Amino acid sequence: MNQWLTHPLEHLNNLSANKMPYHPLLYTTIVYIFTGLIRAVLSAIIKLFRKR
C-alpha cells in the first residue's frame, strides 16, 4: 500500500511489465468453465445409466 501512496505511476508501470501475459481472473474463469463442463458431462453420463 505504501508504494501506491509514494510512487503511484512507477508502481503502475511495474504492474504492466508483469511476466504473466493475461490477468489471473482470465485463468480462473477458464478453469471454472472447464470444471463446469466436466461436471456436466459426468452428470449426463450418470443420468444415462441411472435406473428409472
Image (spheres, rainbow, N blue to C red):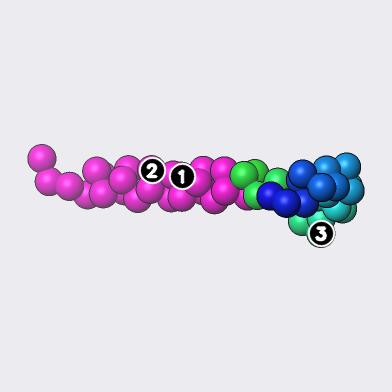
Q: Does residue 36 appear to the left or right of 17 in the view shown? A: left
Determine which of the numbered discs, if any, sits on residue 40 in the image: 2
Q: Residue beneath label 1, please? A: 37
Q: Does residue 11 appear to the left or right of 25 in the view shown? A: right
Q: Marks 3 and 2: which is nearer the front?
A: 3
The image position of residue 40, as x and y in percent, is 38, 43
Quick one: label 1 or label 3, which is nearer the N terminus?
3
Question: Residue at point 65% right, 44% down?
Answer: 26
Q: Check whether the beta carbons of the residues at disc 3 and disc 2 lie within 8 A of each other.
A: no
- Compute the Cα span from label 1 to label 3: 29 Å
- Compute the Cα span from label 3 to label 2: 34 Å
Hey, which residue is sitting farthest bottom in the picture?
A: 19
The image position of residue 10, as x and y in percent, is 89, 48
Question: Residue at point 57% right, 48% down?
Answer: 28
Q: Residues within 10 Å of mark 2 (few under 14, many from 20)?
A: few
Q: Residue beneath label 3, please? A: 19
Q: Check whether the beta carbons of the residues at disc 2 and disc 1 lie within 8 A of each other.
A: yes
Quick one: label 3 or label 2, which is nearer the N terminus?
3
Question: Residue at point 31% right, 45% down?
Answer: 43
- Asked whether residue 18 is drawn in magenta, I would say no
- Compute the Cα span from label 2 to label 1: 5 Å
Q: Secondary structure at mark 2?
A: helix
Q: Residues within 10 Å of mark 1 (few under 14, many from 20)?
A: few
What kind of residue is marked 1?
Answer: Leu
**Dominant secondary structure (helix, strand or loop) of the stretch shown in magenta:** helix
Q: Secondary structure at mark 1?
A: helix
Q: Which range is magenta?
A: 27-52
